[in-house]
Image (cartoon, helix red, strand yellow):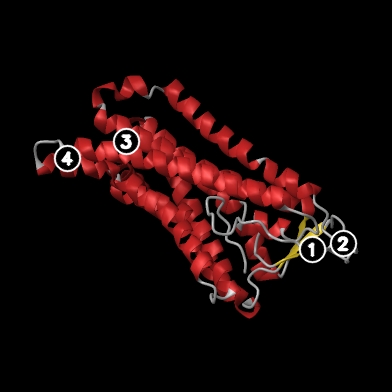
Amino acid sequence: MQETPFCLRVGHLLPYSMSDSNTTDFTNPSTFILLGIPGLEAAHVWISIPFFTMYTIAILGNFTILLIVKMELSLHGPMYYFLCMLSITDLILCTSIVPKMLSIFWFNSREINFSACLTQMYFIHCFSVMGSGILVAMALDRYVAICHPLRHSTILTNPVVAKICLAVMMRGGMLVLPHPFLARQWPYCRTNIIPHSYCEHIAVVKLACADIHVSSYYSLFVAFLVMGLDVFSITVSYVQILRAIFSLPTKDAWHKTFRTCGSHLCVILVSYIPPLFSFLTHRFGNNVPQHFHILIANVYILVPPMLNPIIYSVSTKQIRGRLFRLFTHKGT
């Protein structure tokens, strides 16, 4: 059964038992062959249409968020700095996958250089971990803004925000760095064909004719460490936020305060529900076809980058207002 991509998923990260190989013709191939979505090759062109549409929306939406925050001085604050970092992360994440995937669907360009494959693998998992870390940082910002509003500007100063962003980047970069280094050392003497549309970590290393328990267990460790710490931190933040909200004297105050967290909560749901769904289908969907797992793997890499800017544009008054002024100005 094919693996799902997001490094925060845990269902597919159990060790693989590799067959002993009597086959010796492949040793560290210079290229891998990506099959796209096996079983749906005849529909690749049609499948590419929604993927291309989602990618286009993600690119336009996230660049719009970056432009608006840059232009609007009132948005120069911790929440929107984290939002910009999330937009950059989403842009890099989907761009590391979609162009090659579309070249497979449109031009049958299936070959990918061995080093390029490992680089793509690193970017996918690194920026997935970074995205999760940014959600934690945004939860911290909401906690300080609601539970300690008078101290928000003194706690989350620009240097502190910069340090948080640097810590998020370093955590993603360092935790995922062993993946490509371990993958590079394995001998690939079985096949160089990857039944996937991109170089997902376990999908690559399971092709090795060696004991890959180190890679598998390390992936499992990273998955539980990242998901466990991040979900726990977000949960603690929102428990405190909810306590603060429900201690307010009127329901109007509840609603007004809760609206400030609404967009972030939607982004959290968009980011974590698909991995949960993927985990459940892997653990309990034994009869689910392989192409369905690969489709889900592709879709939910693209869905958060596409929806995040839409969610913030619709639910955040400052961004919505600046967006209207931008288009109104262009139209006059």
Dot 2 amino acid type: Phe
Q: Secondary structure at mark 4?
A: helix
- Name which residue lies at 50% across and 62% down: 278
Q: Which residue, given by chain and number where applicable, does mark 3 sit on? A: 142
Dot 1 amino acid type: Asn
Residues under numbered marks 1 and 2 in contact, where contact means CB atoms less than 8 Å apart:
yes
- Name which residue lies at 90% across and 63% down: 24
The first of marks 4 and 3 along the sequence is 3
Residue 138 in which image quadrant:
top left
Q: Nearer the viewer, residue 54 or 122?
A: 122
Foreground mark, 3 or 2, reads: 2
Residue 23 in which image quadrant:
bottom right
Q: Is residue 331 visible?
A: no
State the CA–CA distance, disc 2 to disc 4.
Answer: 63 Å
x, y percentage for residue 234?
A: 38, 41
Q: Which residue, given by chain and number where applicable, does mark 2 sit on? A: 26
Residue 52 in which image quadrant:
bottom right
x, y percentage for residue 180?
A: 71, 46
Q: Residues within 10 Å of mark 3 (few under 14, many from 20)?
A: many
State the CA–CA distance, disc 1 to disc 3.
Answer: 47 Å
Residues under numbered marks 1 and 3 in contact, where contact means CB atoms less than 8 Å apart:
no
Q: Residues within 10 Å of mark 4 (few under 14, many from 20)?
A: some
State the CA–CA distance, disc 4 to disc 3.
Answer: 15 Å
Residues under numbered marks 1 and 4 in contact, where contact means CB atoms less than 8 Å apart:
no
Foreground mark, 4 or 3, reads: 4
Dot 4 amino acid type: Phe
Q: Secondary structure at mark 1?
A: loop
x, y percentage for residue 79?
A: 37, 35
Q: Secondary structure at mark 3?
A: helix
x, y percentage for residue 43?
A: 60, 78
Q: Is residue 301 visible?
A: yes
Q: Which residue, given by chain and number where applicable, does mark 4 sit on? A: 246
